[in-house]
Image (spheres, grey):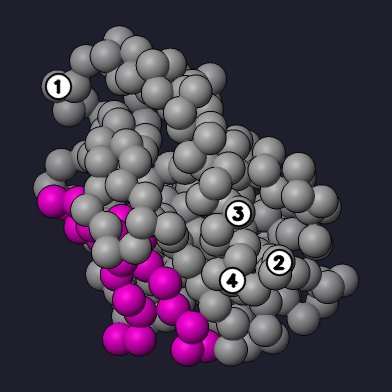
Amino acid sequence: MRIHVVADAADKDGGYVSERLLQRGGVITELDRDALPVFGTLDGSDLVLLLGSDKSAHEEKWTESVTAETRFVRAALAAGTPVMGICYGAQLVARALGGTSWRADQAELGWSRVDTTDHVLCPEGPWGQMHKDVFAPGPTTRVIGTSWRGPQCIVDDSFGARTIAWQFHPEVTPTTYERWVHEGYFGDTGVDPKDLVRQAHAHAPAARNLAHRLTDDALTYLGVVA
């Protein structure tokens, strides 16, 4: 499996998802989302994985980067390469497929269960959350998971290859989540940072197993493995 992982230069940790991809025989090539190549110039790819970011896709200052990444996603799908997205990556997938995203009224943080219509591709969790934005899907995209803030999982098979994306963080490890908390990514929300870190460590054993199983099922849905 040749996998191209799109991420911020300063945060390339694919956590439990990348761990499982490597266990399944994946060979990962990291791509800086602010310097993406033309998709056709890549030396083959069986899967594109878009990780999270502290950017906001709706902010004007990121227009060039967002435009480049959405074009990259569409080119990958047109070439028959499936795409998997996480958090910001899910928002980019939604935009690439005709949807949009915007700033939510309040950040979604900590571990929570999601409402789902597909317990295989979007188990109810609980899953780690850390995002300030919300997205709306495009016209061909199906929402199979939600929280009270918005979509949590989308799938689409109308652009040449299949796509799946999660707003929650199946990949996140306690170490990474703790770093995000200490960096203050979510801003001043009144949520106790110590409680967020406690949740990350308390859910770690189950989270890893959930993430590995979800990665396996997503690979099957995307047609990357039989």
Kindly indicate whether the residue at mark 1 contacts the one at mark 4 (C-beta within 8 angstroms).
no
Q: What residue is at 58 percent from the left and 89 percent from the top?
A: 160
Closest to the camera, between mark 4 and mark 1, is: 4
Callout 3, which amino acid? Asp
Closest to the camera, between mark 1 and mark 2, is: 2
Question: Callout 2: helix, strand or loop?
Answer: loop
Kindly indicate whether the residue at mark 3 contacts the one at mark 2 (C-beta within 8 angstroms).
yes
Tag 4 residue: 222
State the extent of the magenta-drawn residues as a range.
Answer: 139-159
Q: What residue is at 37 percent from the left and 35 percent from the top?
A: 128
Residue 147 belongs to magenta span = yes
- Residue 35 visible to the viewer: yes
Question: Callout 3: helix, strand or loop?
Answer: helix
Q: What residue is at 25 percent from the left and 36 percent from the top?
A: 112
Callout 2, which amino acid? Val
Kindly indicate whether the residue at mark 1 contacts the one at mark 3 (C-beta within 8 angstroms).
no
Callout 1, which amino acid? Gly
Q: Residue 64 in the image: x percent, y percent? A: 51, 67
Upstream in the sequence, badge 3 or badge 1?
A: 1
In the figure, is residue 183 to the left or right of 139?
Answer: right
CA separation in Å, label 3 and label 4: 10 Å
Callout 4, which amino acid? Leu
Upstream in the sequence, badge 4 or badge 1?
A: 1
Tag 1 residue: 190
Tag 2 residue: 225
From this viewpoint, which residue is outermost toward the right?
43
CA separation in Å, label 4 and label 1: 39 Å
- Residue 61 visible to the viewer: no
Corner quadrant of residue 58: bottom left
- Crowd around label 1: few <14 · some 14–19 · many ≥20 (10 Å): few
